[in-house]
Amino acid sequence: MKESSAFELRNGRSPGNGGMTSRGCLFFLLFLTILGAGLFRVGGAYWEYYQVREQVREALTWAVAGQAKDDFSISQRVLSRVNEETDLYLKPRNVLITQTADELTVRVFWTRDLDFWVYTYPLDLEVRLTEYKRWGGRGLVIK
């Protein structure tokens, strides 16, 4: 026991770790910081996705209820909801409306640039929602 304590006093460290513990801890904390920052950026993009999806859902619910609506008015409603309620600014080319006799599909797509310190990754996001038309007095149809 006296040799160990004499060694610690002479060299200022214990013989077991060799000084690697503090350096390894530093690299681990640095790794966790970088990983957390990256996950924060990706999480922000998907939070934006869910906000856009909610606004498109509300606009689609409006579009399939009541009287028949044309593609332009539906597209404008989607754009106004998304642009007012989120930090995203979409243009008419980012909205595609497809109608069949019974269904209405709204597709909204955009690219979100994820800025990592030395690299920017373009993340393509898309919301595609379909509802049955309730034009002309038909009741609510739940899928």
Image (spheres, helix red, strand yellow):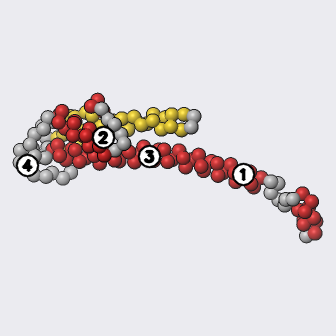
Q: Residue at x 42, y 37 (%)?
A: 112
Separation of marks 3 and 2 at Cα, in angstroms: 17 Å
Label number found at residue 44: 3
Separation of marks 4 and 1 at Cα, in angstroms: 67 Å
Separation of marks 1 and 2 at Cα, in angstroms: 47 Å
Q: Is residue 88 at least partly visible in the picture?
A: yes
Label number found at residue 118: none
Label number found at residue 24: 1
Separation of marks 4 and 2 at Cα, in angstroms: 31 Å
SS for tag 2? helix
Separation of marks 3 and 4 at Cα, in angstroms: 39 Å
Q: Amino acid at mark 2?
A: Asn
- Residue 42 in the image: state x and y as whole percent: 47, 44
- Considering every residue shown, the one lying at the far top of the view is 93
Q: On the image, numbered disc 4 is attached to which residue?
A: 138
1 or 3: mark nearer the eye? 3
